[in-house]
Amino acid sequence: MQETNEMESGMPENVVYVGKKPAMNYVLAVVTQFNNGARAVTIKARGNTIGRAVDVAEIARNRFVMDTKVQNIGISSEEITNEDGTKSKVSAIQIILSK
């Protein structure tokens, strides 16, 4: 039997998707993942929320889970389809914090 890294909802475990909510909401999600035994947590964001994702990583690392380090940072572009059907590229970031 192969062990997967996804919860029953189909979303990967230990991944925090940063959106438009306040940064502390996402910091709480990261800290909760580490408190539940995760060895690494991935923070993902795209577009205008990239700055908030960096804030989340730094707040979690410097104030709450001090024994973590930035394992990797990945940047990319993703093509999305707008509401009017046109396609546009949007920047994305993935920050992996590990203990």
Image (cartoon, rainbow, N blue to C red):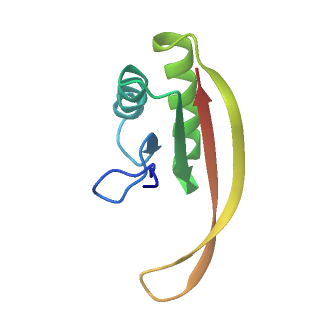
Residue 88 on image: x %, y %: 61, 77
Image height check: is 62 above or below 28? above
Tell me which residue sits at (61%, 36%) in the image.
96
Tell me which residue sits at (38%, 27%) in the image.
24
Residue 70 on image: x %, y %: 67, 27
Task: Tell me which corner region of the image, top left, top right, bottom left or bottom right, holds residue 79.
Answer: bottom right
Image height check: is 28 above or below 91? above
Q: Quadrant of the C terminus?
A: top right
In the image, 29 versus 89, the foreground residue is: 29
Seen as rendered, the residue at the extreme left is 8
Q: Is residue 90 left or right of residue 10?
A: right
Task: Tell me which corner region of the image, top left, top right, bottom left or bottom right, holds residue 53.
Answer: top right
Q: Is residue 17 left or right of residue 86?
A: left
Q: Quadrant of the N terminus?
A: bottom left
Image height check: is 49 above or below 99? below
Tell me which residue sits at (44%, 42%) in the image.
16
Residue 20 on image: x %, y %: 39, 47
Seen as rendered, the residue at the extreme bottom is 85
Tell me which residue sits at (59%, 29%) in the image.
97
Number of callouts: 0
